[in-house]
Amino acid sequence: MSDAETLFERIIAREIPAEIVHETENTVAFRDINPQASVHALVVPKQRYRDVGELAEADPALLAEVLTAAAAVAKLDGIADSGYRVVFNTGADAGQTVFHVHAHVLGGEQLGFFGRGDG
Ligand code: AMP
């Protein structure tokens, strides 16, 4: 897990490459390396919190900045009107693999149902 803990920090620091699509003083957005939709970006706060619950408790204004950045990415990618999904996987049952909170921004096509994965 230690590699996963530092992965997004290394992208933020430009130590490993990523296709960065949006940046603010406190957030960075980049393309997911394994896209699950035509548009799939990740928005991360530069300051590391483990998950969205920890971020919400510690710094709700920063969480709002992450969501504002997600909306900006949707606009930049031309999916603000067609629709998109913002997802925070949180913990093991949700399949969170990188423990630096990140919002998935998914769209650009009709998305499937979500939940148990059998819909
Ligand atoms: P999660 O499973 O919610 O923790 O999401 C982690 C996401 O990070 C996955 O969708 C991965 O495809 C993505 N990911 C892992 N490594 C990289 C990377 N080097 N650059 C971009 N996205 C990555």
Image (tube, rainbow, N blue to C red):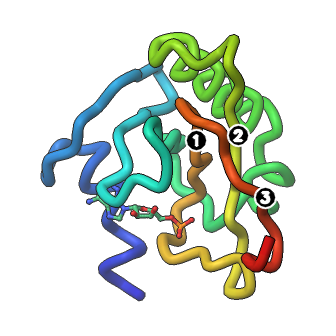
**Towards the viewer: 102 or 49:** 102
Q: Mark 2 = which residue?
A: 85
Place residue 79 in its image quadrant.
Answer: top right
Pointer 2: residues within 10 angstroms few (<14), some, or many (20+)?
few
SS for dot 1: strand
The residue mark sitting in front, 2 or 3, is 3
Q: Mark 1 = which residue?
A: 106
Place residue 80 in its image quadrant.
Answer: top right
For label 1, being within 8 Å of ligand 1 is answered no
Q: Mark 3 = which residue?
A: 113
Pointers 1 and 2 in contact (CB under 8 A)? yes
Measured as percent of width and height from the top left, residue 46 is found at 46, 41
Q: Amino acid at mark 3?
A: Phe
Which quadrant of the rendered structure holds the N terminus? Answer: bottom left
Q: CA distance from mark 1 to mark 2?
A: 5 Å
* Residue at figure coordinates x 69%, y 56% from the top left: 88
Pointer 1: residues within 10 angstroms few (<14), some, or many (20+)?
many
Q: Is residue 44 left or right of residue 1?
A: right
Q: CA distance from mark 3 to mark 1?
A: 13 Å
Q: Relative to 83, say whether 48 is above or below.
A: below
Q: Amino acid at mark 2?
A: Arg
* Residue at figure coordinates x 65%, y 39% from the top left: 110
